[in-house]
Image (cartoon, rainbow, N blue to C red):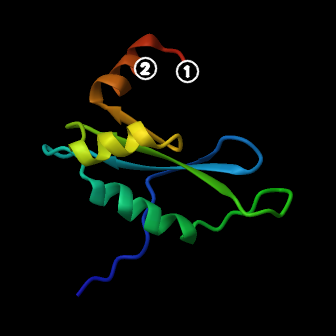
């Protein structure tokens, strides 16, 4: 039996108190709400404290080769802390050669 611990694919600071955490899936099926829920469950395991010693603020990014299920799209429409990126978004950034 293999026991897998928390896994976060993308982690970066956006300012002195905010950490962006991301999940990337390269599957043939759209990413469902379980991907977001798993990411939210794993974020507390990231060992990071902002320089001021306060609790970090989290933002979330989901990356999916095959798009997203409706539940995730609806969550992104309702939340300011969640952004979705599909394969066309990633290719567009790579082809432009600029940061977006």
Which residue occupies 43% across, 53% down? 9
Question: In screen coordinates, is 13 left or right of 61?
Answer: right
Q: Residue 99 shows which numbered tag? A: 1
Which residue occupies 26% across, 48% down? 71
Q: In which quarter of the image is residue 86?
A: top left
Q: Residue furthest top?
A: 96
* Between discs 2 and 1, the one toward the N terminus: 2
Total number of numbered labels? Answer: 2
Dot 1 crowding, Cα within 10 Å, few <14, some 14–19, many 20+: few
Residue 8, x across and y down, in percent = 45, 59
Residue 64, x across and y down, in percent = 29, 40
Q: Residue furthest bottom?
A: 1
| Front residue of this view, candidates 75 and 60 | 75
Mark 2 element type: helix
Mark 1 element type: loop
Position above or below: 44 against 65: below
Which residue occupies 56% across, 69% down? 44
Residue 85, x across and y down, in percent = 37, 33
Question: In screen coordinates, is 20 left or right of 87?
Answer: right
Look at the numbered discs 2 and 1 and tell me whether their residues touch, using CB distance below 8 Å. yes
Dot 2 crowding, Cα within 10 Å, few <14, some 14–19, many 20+: few
Quarter the N terminus occupies: bottom left
| Front residue of this view, candidates 70 and 61 | 70
Position above or below: 58 against 78: below
Q: Quadrant of residue 15?
A: top right
Question: In screen coordinates, is 60 left or right of 63?
Answer: right
Which residue occupies 44% across, 11% down? 96
* Residue to which mark 2 is pinned: 93
Position above or below: 48 against 22: below
């Amino acid at each position: 039996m293999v026991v897998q611990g928390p896994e976060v694919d993308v982690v970066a600071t956006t300012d002195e108190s905010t950490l962006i955490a991301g999940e990337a899936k390269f599957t043939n099926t759209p990413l469902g709400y379980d991907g977001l829920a798993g990411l939210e469950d794993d974020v507390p395991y990231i060992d990071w404290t902002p320089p001021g010693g306060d609790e970090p603020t989290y933002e979330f990014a989901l990356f999916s080769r095959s798009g997203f299920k409706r539940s995730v799209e609806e969550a992104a429409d309702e939340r300011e802390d969640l952004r979705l990126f599909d394969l066309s978004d990633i290719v567009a950034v790579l082809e432009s050669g600029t940061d977006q």
